[in-house]
Image: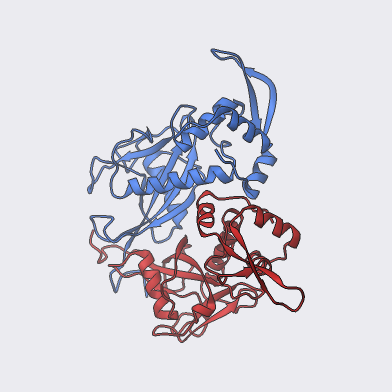
Chain colours: A blue, B red
Amino acid sequence: MSNTCEFPRPALTVDCVVFGYDGGAGLQVLLIRRGIAPFKGAWALPGGFVLMDEGLEDAARRELGEETGLKDVFLEQLFTFGAVDRDPRGRVVSVAYFALVRPDRNPARGDTDADEARWFEVDGMPEVAFDHGEILGAALERLRGKVRYQPVGFELLPKRFTLGKLQGLYEAILGREVDKRNFRRKVLAFDFLVALEEFEMGAHRPGRLYRFDRRRYEALVKRGFLFEL
Amino acid sequence: MSNTCEFPRPALTVDCVVFGYDGGAGLQVLLIRRGIAPFKGAWALPGGFVLMDEGLEDAARRELGEETGLKDVFLEQLFTFGAVDRDPRGRVVSVAYFALVRPDRNPARGDTDADEARWFEVDGMPEVAFDHGEILGAALERLRGKVRYQPVGFELLPKRFTLGKLQGLYEAILGREVDKRNFRRKVLAFDFLVALEEFEMGAHRPGRLYRFDRRRYEALVKRGFLFEL
């Protein structure tokens, strides 16, 4: 068997679900506007064909860079989507990756392969091409599962933050409000936050600032916990 | 783009890691002996090429049936392996699946495509072809992660079992002994076991039999818990 084809075989692509959080109410996702058919002009996940001499994650990283300008993003493999009719061009199987970044540090720009790249609120994003809505749904489900078993926020929050901001991040990921008192009690009990003697001045009373205890945070990523919200 | 090739593309395969537990000390894994080159005569995971008109999981199910005789197995997608040099025949990307079954209900037989299919103890299995050792390692890691967050045993133990047998299953999966008193206290606290008024006569004192509380078990699979052993 060589890699020119004696028999038909599926084409192989990668797609990237990059979630962002900027301190606002909702989670964001990075989409590109397709410059070519099919779905020309439609919004879609960044991605494209895997080259013969590159690994899957390398392909995802390259496509993400080419289409959005994002670099140095930690990508995690999500799932491989291979329904027979998922692409009108023929049989195309796609390995999906996902990542969490701060949009303010990763501004999107349309680059060589896409007309435009933009951050959208997940609630309120446009319809997307192919089965990318399904891929996005799977990524969201994975992320919501993860926050129950691992701390999140290190890559998403500034160095010092209030418990209100951390709660906002959890609410953005979960897509619902959580009880404030319950959230604070439980998150503090995991002991991966360090209370600082600094306060954020707000409209109401000042909020105490916290930072992550990096060692404890990383230990909990490995060991896991159960955070029921 | 049609699915005959205008440009080279990777070939796509599926591979299945089927773990078994039969009440013994170790976890087992189902391997086939390859009938063709490369690695002719070597042991390998059941698997093969994805057809153009079949989904990925369908391909995994078909290959598993053809090579080992196993049918009606619940397969879960594990990870997609795509290192450039993982197959001496050229670029081959493989979507790996894994499953848990009872070997006594799923005896292995070599079928059309493989010379032989056999259950092996994971500790003490032969060297395997390709990167199948790596795939197996990833499956084992996933399974060990899962038992910390979900109950296991429904598909693997008989209807009624002693806590000793359940502990044996956990030890087989984790690959190490766990403290008996600690195990019993914690597993009973999750409340997914029902104590029966029946006992298993053993060499020493009789052991109480338990069954799974199916509703509670399924709720815990969804909700998750943290079982630290």
Quick one: B66 or B146, which is closer to the camera? B146
Q: Residue B88, image x and y in percent?
A: 46, 73
Q: Residue B103, image x and y in percent?
A: 53, 77
Q: Residue B128, image x and y in percent?
A: 55, 76
Question: Horizontally, is A192 left or right of B106 in the view?
Answer: right
Quadrant placement of the C terminus of chain B? bottom right
Question: Horizontally, is A44 left or right of A101 in the view?
Answer: left
Question: Horizontally, is B187 left or right of B54 in the view?
Answer: right
Tell me which residue sits at (55%, 68%) in the image.
B136
Q: Residue A155, image x and y in percent?
A: 55, 37
The relative height of residue B168 versus residue A74 in the rendered view (above or below) is: below
Report the number of discs: 0
Query: For residue A50, which quarter of the picture?
Result: bottom left
Residue A63 visible (yes or no): no
Query: For residue B148, which quarter of the picture?
Result: bottom right
Q: Residue furthest front?
A: B197
Query: For residue A128, which quarter of the picture?
Result: top left
Quick one: A81 or A172, which is closer to the camera? A172
Tell me which residue sits at (47%, 33%) in the image.
A172
Quick one: B69 or A10, which is closer to the camera? B69
The relative height of residue B171 versus residue A78 in the rendered view (above or below) is: below
Residue B223 visible (yes or no): yes
Quadrant placement of the N terminus of chain B? bottom left
